[in-house]
């Protein structure tokens, strides 16, 4: 640091995902002590600050303006300002803007202070009733059906528990796609409106949850975090044996995609796994 230069500081502040009682003392102090607060949606953050009795200048930083805003915010930091970065809810950068700013601050030598707190990811994992010793966060899946199914096909054999965010109007179709690609019996949990008045956690197989999503209107409301158990190696081996017998019959009469869909429904394995075995069968290659 240049002698005599005032050092600014960037504080990355986690805020409540619903329940205002989850605001930590450090988060409150960080917001009160900031020269400026950088917010994903200034209207949302104004409501949060009003509830806390805090008034600070705000700058918006979202997916559409982050690249343009970073230089001016970095200049403020280099001029000695203390800036708090917040998202609309939870921990910034996790499927939220802020990465470019944090990276630029780090590269410029600006001290970065994380203020830990709420996150829908860890909150949902804690209540899902699924293995959490190893997990990976996938954020939002592609909105288009074909792209979503292709992405899920690549994840079907992932052994770690998977965490997704999903929009309420897509949750039913996403669960149906998951059941098709991962297998109908894979365990999962759907957490909606976490820490809020209507918090609900649905648990069951992917097939059961997909059917429930179609039956219950409330299932398709609010903010949703989806937890899916990873692929167990031992069950894949058992399903593969059943699948080979189904493939022998179906591949003779049906196109590969249709045969894979039916084999998946009959055996409970993923559609992608069934398709791979069918194409290998058609090419005369041995099973692996």
Image (cartoon, rainbow, N blue to C red):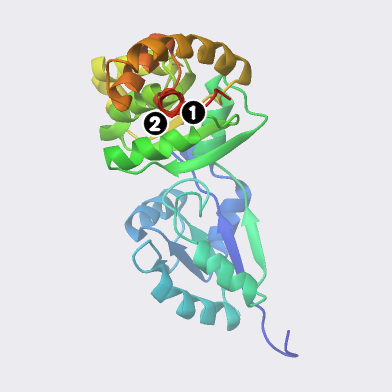
Q: In the figure, 256 relative to 265: above or below?
A: below
The quadrant of the rendering that contains the C terminus is: top right
Looking at this view, is 234 or 108 the one in front? 234
Tags 2 and 1 in contact by the CB under 8 Å rule? no
Q: Quadrant of residue 272?
A: top left
Residue at the bottom extreme, as displayed: 3
Looking at this view, is 98 or 113 the one in front? 98
Q: Earlier in the sequence, mark 2 or mark 1?
A: 2
Residue at the image position 47 percent from the left and 37 percent from the top: 154
Image disc number at residue 193: 2
Packing grade of label 2 (10 A; few <14, some 14-19, many >=20) is some
Packing grade of label 1 (10 A; few <14, some 14-19, many >=20) is many
The residue wearing badge 1 is: 227
Tag 2, which secondary structure? loop
Looking at this view, is 138 or 267 the one in front? 267
Residue 198 visible in image: no
């Amino acid at each position: 640091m240049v002698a005599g230069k005032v050092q600014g500081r960037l504080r990355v502040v986690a805020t409540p995902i619903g329940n205002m009682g989850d605001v930590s003392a450090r988060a409150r102090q960080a917001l009160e002590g900031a020269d400026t607060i950088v917010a994903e949606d200034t209207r949302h953050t104004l409501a949060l600050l009003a509830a806390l009795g805090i008034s600070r200048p705000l700058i918006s930083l979202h997916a559409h303006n982050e690249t343009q805003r970073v230089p001016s915010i970095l200049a403020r930091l280099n001029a000695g300002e203390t800036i708090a970065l917040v998202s609309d809810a939870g921990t910034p950068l996790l499927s939220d803007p802020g990465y470019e700013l944090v990276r630029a601050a780090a590269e410029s030598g600006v001290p970065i202070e994380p203020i830990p707190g709420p996150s829908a990811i860890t909150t949902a994992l804690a209540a899902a009733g699924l293995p959490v010793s190893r997990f990976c966060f996938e954020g939002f899946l592609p909105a288009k059906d074909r792209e979503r199914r292709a992405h899920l096909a690549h994840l079907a054999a992932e052994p770690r528990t998977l965490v997704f965010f999903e929009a309420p109007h897509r949750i039913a179709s996403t669960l149906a796609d998951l059941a098709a690609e991962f297998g109908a019996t894979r365990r999962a949990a759907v957490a909606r409106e976490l820490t809020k008045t209507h918090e609900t956690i649905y648990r069951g197989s992917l097939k059961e949850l997909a059917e429930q999503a179609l039956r219950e209107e409330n299932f398709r409301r609010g903010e949703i975090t989806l937890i899916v158990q990873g692929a167990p190696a031992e069950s894949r081996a058992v399903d593969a044996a059943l699948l080979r017998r189904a493939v022998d019959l179906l591949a003779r009469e049906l196109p590969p995609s249709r045969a894979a869909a039916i084999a998946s429904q009959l055996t409970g394995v993923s559609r992608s796994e069934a398709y791979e075995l069918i194409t290998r069968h058609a090419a005369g290659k041995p099973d692996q």
